[in-house]
Image (tube, rainbow, N blue to C red):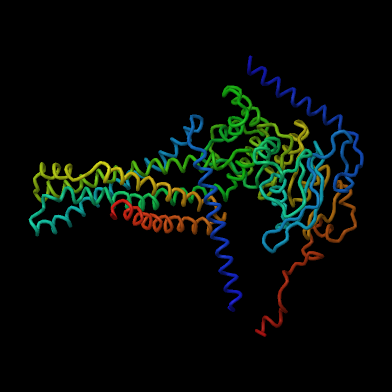
Amino acid sequence: MSIQLCLLAQLRTICCSVSVRLVCLPLVLVRNGCGMNIEVSPKLKSLVEICNLKFSRGEHVIFDNISLSIPRGKITAIMGPSGIGKTTLLKLIGGQLTPDSGSVLFDGKDVHRCSRKELFTLRKRMSMLFQSGALFTDMNVFDNVAFALREHSGLAEEIIARIVLMKLEAVGLRGTAKMMPSELSGGMQRRVALARAIALEPDMVMYDEPFAGQDPISMGVLVKLIKELSAALGLTSVVISHDVQEVLGIADYVYVMADKSVIAQGTPEELQIADNEQLKQFMGGEPDGPVPFHYPAANYAEELVGQ
Amino acid sequence: MNMAESLANLGRGGIALVTGLGKAGIMLWGAIAHKPRLKGLPLFVKQLYVVGVQSMVLILISGLFIGMVLALQGYNILVGFGTEESLGPMVALSLLRELGPVVTALLFAGRAGSALTAEIGLMKSTEQLSSLEMMAIDPLRQIIAPRFWAGVVSLPLLTLMFTAIGIYGGYIVGVEWKGIDGGSFWSILQASVEWREDIVNCLIKSFLFGIVVTWIALYRGYQVVPNPEGISKATTQTVVQSSLAVLALDFLLTAIMFGR
C-alpha cells in the first residue's frame, strides 16, 4: 500500500509540475528587483535574483557588479569562455562562496544573510550537478542516489528503494544500481549524479558544465535528460556551459558572460542575431577577435633577441 | 627586500597563522560537537575499522621488534651490573611511559594520518565535500567527526597493544633467549608498574596524541589545495607536523607527569 502511495505521490508531483508549467506559459516582460527586463510569468516571477554582485579572489576581480534573474520553471543557460567564473557563480548561488557585495536571492531569501540552518533548508530546495559528477566513491550507485533521501526524507527504506529505482529508471541506469561509480563511464556517472540531484525533487537544479568531455552520444543523452526532466518535474534549471549548440538547443533564456560582467542576454534566437562582436566571436568559436588569441606579453621580436 | 616589505611579509605570515589556527579550531569544535550518536554509529564503526584495525598489523609487528631490541640492549647493560633480573621493569616502564605512546603515535601518523589526509583531500578535489554541502549535509558531521572520534578511540587501544606485545618481545629475548628467570621477570615487572603513575599516564598521553594527530591529519585534508600537488604536500605536512607535535607534546606531558 505504501509503495502505491509513493508512486501516486510521484505521479501527482509530475502532474502538478506540468500543470504549473502550462499555467506559466503566457510570459511577459517584467522589470525585476535589479532593474532588468526579463521574461517571467507574472504569477511566479524569478526563483533566483542576483543583484549588483561583486566577487573577487584576492586582487583578481571575478564579477564586477553583475545582475541577472533565473526565471522559475525554465531552463536558463549561463555561457562564457573558460575561466570566466561560471562555476563560481553557481557556488555563489548555492551559498558556498560569499560575495564582496551585492545579493543573491533564492525565492526572495538572501542566501548570504541566512543562518547555517536556514541555508541548509534552502539547499534542500536546490541541487547541483557537479562537473565531475562528485559521486561518493565508497558507495554504489543505489546508495549514492539514496543518500540524500536517507538523510532528509525520513521515509522507510522500502519506499526509498522504490524512489531510487524510479530516479535511476528516469536516467536510464536502473541496471547499474549495484555497480560502483568507478565501474561507470564519465557520461554514466553524470547521469547517476543527475538521478541523485533530483532525488529530493528540488525546485532548482544547477548543472555545472554537464557536457564537458562527453562523446556525442553521451552528450545527446544528457541534453535530452535535462530537457525532459526539467519539463516533467517543472524544474528551474541553470545550465553552465560553453557548448554553444547544445545549450542553445534546450535553453529558454541565455546569459553570456565575459570581462567580469554579462555581455549579452536573451532567448537563443535573439542571441543568434545580436550585433555584438564579442558575442559573435564566442558563438562562432573564432580564435581571434575582441578576446585576443595571444595572452598579453612583451614585444615578441625583442624577447626573441633577448632585449 | 626592504624593511617595509619584510614587515608586510611578517604580518601576512602572522595573519595566515592565526587564520589557520582559527579554522583548525572551528573544525575541531565541529568534530567534537558531532560525537558519534546511534544514527551515525555505522559511520564511526567503519572508520574505527579503517583507522584502527587496519593499523594493527603495523603496530603489533613494530611493538614486538621494539620490545625485543629494547630488551637486548637493556640486557647487555644490566648484565654488566649483575642486575639483569630488572630487565622486565626496564622494558615495561620504557614502553609504558615513553616508547609506547610516542612510537605508536608516530606510526599512526604515518599510516592512518597520511591516509586520512589523502582521502579527504581527494574527496575535496573530486567535489564530494561540496556535493555534501549542496545536499544540506554538514561535512563536519558526515566526514570529519566519525574519523576524528575513530582516531581518538583507536590510538590509546593501539598503544596498549603496542606496549603489551613489546613487553612480550622483551620476555622472548630476556627469558627465552638470554635465560633470565621467567618468574623474576614477571614478578619484578608487576611490582614496579604502577596503575596510576604508569598505565593511566600512558593512556592520557596516547589519548592526547590521538587528538593531535587526527586533528592535524583531518585539517590538512580539509584545507588541501585540490590538485595532485596540493594533496601530496598536505600528506607530507601531516606526517611532519604530527610527528613534531607528538614529540613536543610528549616532552611537555612528561615534564608534567614525571618532572617533579
In the displayed structure, does residue A149 sit left or right of residue B156? right
Give the residue at the far top of this rendering: A1
Expressed as whole percent of the image width and height from the top left, the position of residue A51 reads 80, 49
In the displayed structure, does residue A170 sit left or right of residue B34? right
Viewport quadrant of the C terminus of chain A: bottom right
Q: Nearer the viewer, residue B156 or A196?
A: B156
Expressed as whole percent of the image width and height from the top left, the position of residue A279 reads 83, 57
In the displayed structure, does residue B63 sit left or right of residue B145? left
Expressed as whole percent of the image width and height from the top left, the position of residue B169 reads 20, 47
Q: Please report the residue visible at 24 percent of the width from the left and 44 percent of the height from the top.
A: B165
Q: Nearer the viewer, residue B186 or A72?
A: B186
Q: Nearer the viewer, residue A12 or B212?
A: B212
A179 relative to B18, above or below: above
Viewport quadrant of the N terminus of chain A: top right
Expressed as whole percent of the image width and height from the top left, the position of residue A16 reads 79, 25
Quarter location, residue B129: top right
